[in-house]
Structures are given as structure tokens and as C-alpha cells.
Amino acid sequence: MGGLEPFEEDETGTVFRDVILLALAGFVAIVVMLLPHLNPPDAKTADAMDPPGNVIIEARWADEWDTDVDLWVQAPGDVPVGYSNKGGAIFNLLRDDLGRRGDATEMNYEVTYSRGIPPGEYTANVHLYRNPERKLPVPVTVVVSVKKSAQESGRQILASKVELNREGQELTVFRFKLDEAGDLVPGSVHNLQRPLRNWKPS
């Protein structure tokens, strides 16, 4: 009879270990099943590759310069959109870059997106707001892309490089027309100066 007690203690220990191991295995299985749902990589990739908006206008200048260039845009029948008026009925300014001031990145870049593609004339201007670098001229590249639907990717329709020669200067880079289908109207592109920063409704 004295030999049975150690056997019972060992059997109790084995059962306890089995229960603990089964509980741990169940917990690990639940964690493994939940991992794909906590941080879906495909959703982030799609957002990064697919910009919002339909008409995308971007301005880019030298990253190493502490220079504040402003992008101003106007859609048909809407108010101009820029640093002092970041949203209209059609366009929104998504990035107002101040050069190196308060900037988490080294990229000098501004971008606007539209909601929809109303037909008519669009205007894209750049303005040299602040230039502590004292380097002139300031070359700025402006690109216009159109994305007709959520299923399509943006298609570049215009690109130009201009030079700003003095602080306070505002240049019209593009004036262009889009038709009802969102296509560029042939012969509609020009750069006849049209101020937007101090625009007043006529």
C-alpha cells in the first residue's frame, strides 16, 4: 500500500501538466488566428498606392532648400484653394509645406486633390512666400494628374518646370480645360497670368 502513494502523486502532476499545456496551446492558436486581423498589410498597401481625389495637382522644389513655395489652384466655379484657404467645394490642399519650418520630412512638396471632375477651366499657380535661403531663381515642378474613377489609377496629363525670381512672386503655371468625360480639351492649355492668392469674386 505504501507504494501506491507516489504513483497517485505522479498521476496528479501529469494531469495538471496536460491541462496547462492544452490551455497554452489553445491560447497560442487563438493569437495566431487573430494576427491577420490586427494589422492587415494589404489595406495599407492599397491606401499608399491609391491617392484620393480625381484631379491631383502637385508642386515640388529642391528638398535641401529652406524655401516656402505655395501651390494655389482653382476649379471651375469654385474659390481658389491655397495656404490661407485650404478647402473649397471642389479642391482641398492636403499639404502646406513651409520649407524646413516645422517639417517632419526633408521633402519640399505641396499637393491638392479634387472631389469630382467638373468640366471647365482649371488654374494652377505657384507663389514664393518666404525665401530665407536667398537663392534665386527657385525652380518649381508642377504636375497635374486625373483619376476618373476609384478603379483607375491617376494619369499624368500636364507637367512643367517654372522659376520664381523674387519673394512674393505668383506665377500661373497652367490654365487648362477638362471636358465632361474628364479629358483634357485640346488646345486649352496656356499660362496667361491669373492671380489666385488675392482673388476676389467678380
Image (cartoon, rainbow, N blue to C red):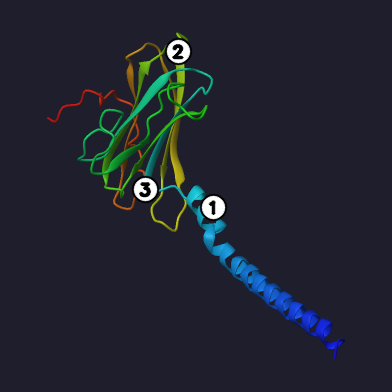
Q: Which mark is residue 12?
A: none
x, y percentage for residue 116? 30, 50
- Label 3, residues with CA under 10 Å away: few <14, some 14-19, many ≥20: many
Q: Residues within 10 Å of mark 2 (few under 14, many from 20)?
A: few
Task: Report if residue 101 is visible in the image.
Answer: yes
Residue sitting at 74 percent across and 81 percent down?
12
- The secondary element bearing badge 1 is classed as helix
Mark 3 falls on what kind of element? loop
Quadrant assignment for the N terminus = bottom right
- Picture residue at 71% right of the left edge, 77% below the top: 16
Earlier in the chain: of badge 1 and badge 3, it is 1
Which of the 4 image quarters holds residue 172?
top left
In front: mark 1 or mark 2? 1
Picture disc at residue 54: 3
x, y (%) of residue 132? Answer: 43, 11
- The type of residue carrying mark 3 is Asn
User: Residue pushed farthest front?
Assistant: 2
Going by the numbered disc 1, the residue's amino acid type is Thr
> Which residue position holds label 1?
45
User: Do the residues under discs 1 and 3 have CB atoms within 8 angstroms?
Assistant: no
